[in-house]
Image (spheres, rainbow, N blue to C red):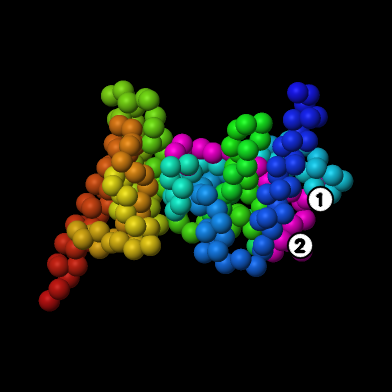
Amino acid sequence: MTRTAVLATFLAALMVNVIFADEPGWTDEERAARSVAVFDGRVVSVKRIEAVNDHVELHSAVISVETVFKGKELVDNDKITVYFEQPVSGDVGKSCPAYVELKQARRAKFFVRTRKVEGQLRAFLEMGSDAREATTEASPIFSSEKSPENSKEAVEAATKQGAATAAKDIKAGKLRILYYGKPLRVDLFPTDEETGYPVQVVAGCIVSGTFVAEADAYNRAMREWAVKQMSSDESKRP
């Protein structure tokens, strides 16, 4: 099949998606019910694929997945590629006020639908509707959850990184405890019993050695700071 024919098939699938998904008035709950996956993530890169017509272009974006609210079985990788339309002029404010422009490093909450293109499932976003302001904070952990690099040197570097990030957050007054492991309900906003700090879920059960080392070092620094603060408060009491 020629490139033009493949593109025509791809755009046809996209237009079907738009016809059934273009409902800017939906609430996030209604939109989530019509989506196969909902997650917070950060834009890694954006690429223009082709012009749909004189006014709209087809783009793709690679998204680094952070917190998954729906479709964990579908969003099972660190990154996912999504496809979306964008006005040629880049002016999306007038026609799509809810639209979060997808630029590199931008965080957003994504509502994803899938369509088959050339026998493969592709993830689609409806421009102006399926990318909203992100609802959770970005993970402060740099190490990949699935990194194959778990050497002694890499673990030591990750440990130093976790401690350094915690020190920076403490200085900024951003106090929290990171959680990975058995999934927690994201709507409960749990707090850590030992420190009283809010708990932020940063990963599930399957994590790399470097991720564990960095997250544990971060939490260790936070807990040590909490103990110092409690001791200081005790000493100030009459």
Residue 176 against residue 78 in the figure, above or below:
below
- The image quadrant of residue 236 is bottom left
Q: Residues within 10 Å of mark 2 (few under 14, many from 20)?
A: few
Seen in the picture, residue 63 relative to 70 is either above or below; the reply is above
**Quadrant assignment, res 230:** bottom left
Span colored in magenta: 75-97
Cα distance in 3D space between marks 2 and 1? 12 Å
Q: How many marks?
A: 2
* Residue 178 shows in the view: no
- Give the x, y percent position of residue 186: 37, 58
The percent coordinates of residue 195 (x first, y second) are 23, 59
**Residue 132 located within the stretch drawn in magenta:** no
Mark 1 is surrounded, within 10 Å at the Cα level, by few (under 14), some (14 to 19) or many (20 or more) other residues, namely: few
x 80%, y 47%: residue: 56
Vertical order, 170 against 84 (above or below): below
Q: Residue at x 31, y 46 (%)?
A: 180
Residue that numbered label 2 is attached to: 95
Q: Residues at badges 2 and 1 in contact (C-beta under 8 Å)?
A: no
> What element does badge 2 sit on?
loop
Marks 2, 1: nearer the viewer: 2
* Image spot of residue 115 (x, y percent): 62, 42
Q: What is the secondary structure assignment of the residue under circle 1?
A: loop
Amino acid at the residue labelled 2? Ser
Q: Quadrant of the C terminus?
A: bottom left
The answer to whether residue 111 is left or right of residue 218 is right
The numbered dot on residue 89 is 1
91 in relation to 158, above or below = below
Q: Is residue 51 left or right of residue 97?
A: right
Which one is nearer the viewer's eye here, 112 or 44?
112
The prevailing secondary structure element of the residues shown in magenta is loop
Q: Amino acid at mark 1?
A: Ser
Residue 150, horizontal then vertical, whole percent: 32, 26
